[in-house]
Amino acid sequence: MDMNNNINKPSFDTYIEELYKINAEDKKRAERIAKRGLEELEYKSDTKSYSSTGSSKTFLGIDTKQACLIFVCILIALCGCLVQDATLILMYIFGLVFFFAGVFVSLTFPLFGLIFLATHGGTGLFIMISSLVSSNIENLFQITKNPAFSDGGIPADLKQYLIATGCVFIVAIIYTILHNLSPRLKEDKKHMIIILFIFFIGILLVGLAPRIFPYLIFSD
Protein backbone atom coordinates (compact mmCIF):
# COMPACT_ATOMS: atom_id res chain seq x y z
CA MET A 1 0.00 0.00 0.00
CA ASP A 2 1.36 3.42 -0.99
CA MET A 3 0.54 5.76 1.89
CA ASN A 4 1.54 8.86 -0.06
CA ASN A 5 -1.08 8.15 -2.74
CA ASN A 6 -3.87 7.21 -0.34
CA ILE A 7 -3.63 9.99 2.24
CA ASN A 8 -5.49 13.21 1.51
CA LYS A 9 -3.11 15.99 2.54
CA PRO A 10 -5.67 18.54 3.86
CA SER A 11 -7.54 15.84 5.78
CA PHE A 12 -4.28 14.50 7.17
CA ASP A 13 -3.20 17.95 8.33
CA THR A 14 -6.55 18.44 10.05
CA TYR A 15 -6.19 15.03 11.69
CA ILE A 16 -2.75 15.94 13.04
CA GLU A 17 -3.96 19.28 14.36
CA GLU A 18 -6.87 17.64 16.18
CA LEU A 19 -4.54 14.96 17.53
CA TYR A 20 -2.24 17.63 18.96
CA LYS A 21 -5.22 19.29 20.68
CA ILE A 22 -6.33 15.99 22.21
CA ASN A 23 -2.77 15.22 23.26
CA ALA A 24 -2.59 18.51 25.18
CA GLU A 25 -5.66 17.47 27.23
CA ASP A 26 -5.31 13.70 27.44
CA LYS A 27 -2.10 12.00 26.25
CA LYS A 28 -3.47 8.50 26.78
CA ARG A 29 -6.51 9.20 24.59
CA ALA A 30 -4.29 10.71 21.88
CA GLU A 31 -2.10 7.61 21.98
CA ARG A 32 -5.11 5.33 21.56
CA ILE A 33 -6.37 7.36 18.58
CA ALA A 34 -2.93 7.33 16.97
CA LYS A 35 -2.65 3.55 17.38
CA ARG A 36 -6.06 3.00 15.82
CA GLY A 37 -5.00 5.19 12.91
CA LEU A 38 -1.86 3.11 12.43
CA GLU A 39 -3.91 -0.07 12.49
CA GLU A 40 -6.22 1.29 9.78
CA LEU A 41 -3.14 2.06 7.66
CA GLU A 42 -1.99 -1.55 8.28
CA TYR A 43 1.15 -0.22 9.94
CA LYS A 44 3.57 -2.93 11.09
CA SER A 45 6.75 -2.77 13.11
CA ASP A 46 9.48 -5.34 13.75
CA THR A 47 9.71 -4.47 17.43
CA LYS A 48 6.14 -3.60 18.42
CA SER A 49 2.65 -4.77 17.61
CA TYR A 50 -0.37 -2.60 18.24
CA SER A 51 -3.68 -3.96 19.47
CA SER A 52 -6.66 -3.09 21.64
CA THR A 53 -4.70 -4.31 24.65
CA GLY A 54 -1.87 -1.83 24.15
CA SER A 55 1.62 -2.14 22.69
CA SER A 56 3.57 -5.29 23.42
CA LYS A 57 7.25 -6.03 22.77
CA THR A 58 8.17 -9.14 20.88
CA PHE A 59 11.17 -11.44 21.12
CA LEU A 60 11.91 -13.73 18.16
CA GLY A 61 8.40 -12.96 16.96
CA ILE A 62 6.87 -13.99 20.30
CA ASP A 63 4.58 -11.58 22.14
CA THR A 64 6.38 -11.31 25.49
CA LYS A 65 3.27 -10.34 27.45
CA GLN A 66 1.32 -13.22 25.96
CA ALA A 67 4.19 -15.55 26.88
CA CYS A 68 4.25 -14.20 30.45
CA LEU A 69 0.48 -14.71 30.72
CA ILE A 70 0.81 -18.34 29.64
CA PHE A 71 3.74 -18.83 32.03
CA VAL A 72 1.72 -17.58 35.03
CA CYS A 73 -1.17 -19.87 34.05
CA ILE A 74 1.27 -22.79 34.01
CA LEU A 75 2.50 -21.81 37.48
CA ILE A 76 -1.08 -21.89 38.78
CA ALA A 77 -1.59 -25.32 37.20
CA LEU A 78 1.65 -26.59 38.75
CA CYS A 79 0.32 -25.71 42.22
CA GLY A 80 -1.66 -28.91 41.77
CA CYS A 81 1.61 -30.75 42.49
CA LEU A 82 1.15 -29.68 46.12
CA VAL A 83 -1.90 -31.96 46.35
CA GLN A 84 -0.58 -34.91 48.37
CA ASP A 85 -3.50 -37.24 47.63
CA ALA A 86 -3.28 -38.40 44.01
CA THR A 87 -7.05 -39.00 43.89
CA LEU A 88 -7.63 -35.29 44.43
CA ILE A 89 -5.43 -34.09 41.56
CA LEU A 90 -8.32 -34.51 39.12
CA MET A 91 -10.42 -32.43 41.51
CA TYR A 92 -7.79 -29.67 41.34
CA ILE A 93 -7.71 -29.80 37.52
CA PHE A 94 -11.52 -29.66 37.38
CA GLY A 95 -11.50 -26.58 39.60
CA LEU A 96 -8.65 -25.09 37.56
CA VAL A 97 -10.75 -25.20 34.36
CA PHE A 98 -13.63 -23.42 36.09
CA PHE A 99 -11.26 -20.88 37.64
CA PHE A 100 -9.59 -19.95 34.34
CA ALA A 101 -12.95 -19.72 32.58
CA GLY A 102 -14.36 -17.39 35.22
CA VAL A 103 -11.28 -15.18 35.50
CA PHE A 104 -10.62 -14.77 31.78
CA VAL A 105 -14.26 -14.00 31.00
CA SER A 106 -14.32 -11.44 33.82
CA LEU A 107 -11.13 -9.85 32.51
CA THR A 108 -12.54 -9.60 28.98
CA PHE A 109 -16.25 -8.78 29.14
CA PRO A 110 -17.39 -5.72 31.17
CA LEU A 111 -20.13 -6.24 33.80
CA PHE A 112 -21.30 -9.56 32.34
CA GLY A 113 -17.90 -11.02 33.17
CA LEU A 114 -18.41 -10.31 36.87
CA ILE A 115 -21.14 -12.95 36.91
CA PHE A 116 -18.64 -15.51 35.66
CA LEU A 117 -16.11 -14.32 38.22
CA ALA A 118 -18.56 -15.08 41.02
CA THR A 119 -19.87 -18.36 39.59
CA HIS A 120 -17.15 -20.10 37.60
CA GLY A 121 -14.14 -18.26 39.04
CA GLY A 122 -15.30 -18.49 42.64
CA THR A 123 -16.43 -22.09 42.31
CA GLY A 124 -13.20 -23.13 40.61
CA LEU A 125 -11.04 -21.41 43.22
CA PHE A 126 -13.03 -23.05 46.03
CA ILE A 127 -12.58 -26.50 44.46
CA MET A 128 -8.85 -25.92 43.98
CA ILE A 129 -8.37 -24.76 47.57
CA SER A 130 -10.52 -27.62 48.85
CA SER A 131 -8.38 -30.18 47.02
CA LEU A 132 -5.20 -28.65 48.47
CA VAL A 133 -6.59 -28.60 52.00
CA SER A 134 -8.39 -31.97 51.84
CA SER A 135 -5.23 -33.76 50.74
CA ASN A 136 -3.53 -32.47 53.87
CA ILE A 137 -6.47 -32.75 56.28
CA GLU A 138 -4.73 -35.37 58.42
CA ASN A 139 -1.66 -33.19 58.80
CA LEU A 140 -3.80 -30.20 59.67
CA PHE A 141 -5.69 -32.23 62.26
CA GLN A 142 -2.45 -33.27 63.91
CA ILE A 143 -1.29 -29.66 63.94
CA THR A 144 -4.44 -28.48 65.72
CA LYS A 145 -3.80 -31.06 68.45
CA ASN A 146 -0.57 -29.26 69.27
CA PRO A 147 -0.57 -27.81 72.85
CA ALA A 148 0.04 -24.38 71.34
CA PHE A 149 -3.63 -24.30 70.29
CA SER A 150 -5.15 -25.55 73.55
CA ASP A 151 -2.91 -23.43 75.77
CA GLY A 152 -2.88 -20.11 73.98
CA GLY A 153 -5.26 -20.28 71.06
CA ILE A 154 -4.02 -19.80 67.52
CA PRO A 155 -0.34 -18.75 67.54
CA ALA A 156 0.31 -15.17 66.39
CA ASP A 157 2.52 -16.22 63.46
CA LEU A 158 -0.17 -18.58 62.23
CA LYS A 159 -2.79 -15.83 62.43
CA GLN A 160 -0.58 -13.51 60.42
CA TYR A 161 -0.07 -16.20 57.77
CA LEU A 162 -3.81 -16.80 57.43
CA ILE A 163 -4.59 -13.07 57.33
CA ALA A 164 -1.87 -12.47 54.72
CA THR A 165 -3.24 -15.29 52.55
CA GLY A 166 -6.76 -13.92 52.80
CA CYS A 167 -5.56 -10.42 51.91
CA VAL A 168 -3.81 -11.75 48.80
CA PHE A 169 -7.09 -13.20 47.50
CA ILE A 170 -9.00 -10.03 48.40
CA VAL A 171 -6.50 -7.88 46.48
CA ALA A 172 -6.71 -10.22 43.47
CA ILE A 173 -10.53 -10.11 43.44
CA ILE A 174 -10.69 -6.32 43.80
CA TYR A 175 -8.08 -5.91 41.05
CA THR A 176 -10.11 -8.21 38.79
CA ILE A 177 -13.28 -6.20 39.38
CA LEU A 178 -11.47 -2.93 38.64
CA HIS A 179 -10.05 -4.45 35.46
CA ASN A 180 -13.53 -5.52 34.43
CA LEU A 181 -14.95 -2.01 34.91
CA SER A 182 -12.00 0.00 33.58
CA PRO A 183 -11.40 0.26 29.79
CA ARG A 184 -8.00 1.80 30.53
CA LEU A 185 -6.77 -1.27 32.44
CA LYS A 186 -7.90 -3.50 29.58
CA GLU A 187 -5.55 -1.65 27.23
CA ASP A 188 -2.46 -3.34 28.66
CA LYS A 189 -2.06 -7.10 29.16
CA LYS A 190 0.32 -6.53 32.05
CA HIS A 191 -2.68 -6.06 34.34
CA MET A 192 -3.99 -9.52 33.44
CA ILE A 193 -0.56 -10.94 34.19
CA ILE A 194 -0.39 -9.19 37.57
CA ILE A 195 -3.90 -10.34 38.54
CA LEU A 196 -3.19 -13.97 37.73
CA PHE A 197 0.17 -13.77 39.48
CA ILE A 198 -1.52 -12.50 42.65
CA PHE A 199 -3.97 -15.41 42.47
CA PHE A 200 -0.97 -17.72 42.02
CA ILE A 201 0.64 -16.36 45.20
CA GLY A 202 -2.58 -16.95 47.16
CA ILE A 203 -3.02 -20.51 45.85
CA LEU A 204 0.65 -21.26 46.53
CA LEU A 205 0.31 -20.02 50.12
CA VAL A 206 -2.67 -22.33 50.64
CA GLY A 207 -0.78 -25.28 49.18
CA LEU A 208 2.29 -24.63 51.33
CA ALA A 209 0.29 -23.98 54.52
CA PRO A 210 0.33 -27.56 55.89
CA ARG A 211 4.10 -27.66 55.41
CA ILE A 212 4.68 -24.26 57.01
CA PHE A 213 2.19 -24.46 59.90
CA PRO A 214 4.34 -26.74 62.11
CA TYR A 215 7.26 -24.31 61.91
CA LEU A 216 5.00 -21.38 62.72
CA ILE A 217 3.60 -23.16 65.77
CA PHE A 218 6.88 -24.40 67.15
CA SER A 219 8.48 -21.00 66.62
CA ASP A 220 6.35 -19.71 69.53
Image: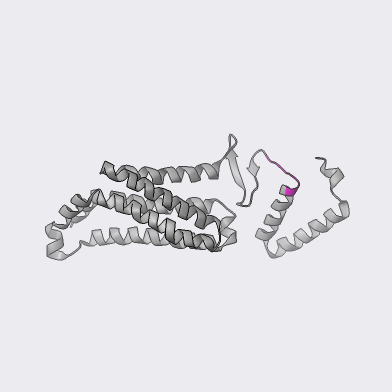
Q: Is residue 113 left or right of residue 1?
A: left
Give residue 127's position: percent from left, percent from top.
Answer: 34, 53
Give residue 86's position: percent from left, percent from top.
Answer: 27, 41
Would you say residue 83 is visible in this rendering? no
Q: Nearer the viewer, residue 132 or 61?
A: 132
The magenta stretch spans residue 44? yes
Would you say residue 26 is visible in this rendering? yes
The span shown in magenta is 40-45
Q: Is residue 210 left or right of residue 5?
A: left
Q: Main secondary structure of the magenta part?
A: loop
Q: Quadrant of the N terminus?
A: top right
The mark total stands at: 0
Q: Nearer the viewer, residue 89 or 218?
A: 89
**Residue that appears at 14% across and 60% down:** 148
Q: Above or below — where is 114 with respect to 44? A: below
The magenta stretch spans residue 118? no
Q: Quadrant of the C terminus?
A: bottom left
Q: Residue furthest top?
A: 60
**Residue that appears at 87% across and 51% down:** 9
**Residue that appears at 53% across and 51% down:** 190
Give residue 128's position: percent from left, percent from top.
Answer: 34, 51
Give residue 85's position: percent from left, percent from top.
Answer: 25, 44
Q: How is the image coloured?
A: one colour
Q: Above or below — where is 100 with respect to 149? A: above
Q: Is residue 13 left or right of residue 36?
A: right
**Residue that appears at 44% across and 45% down:** 73
Residue 43, image quadrant: top right
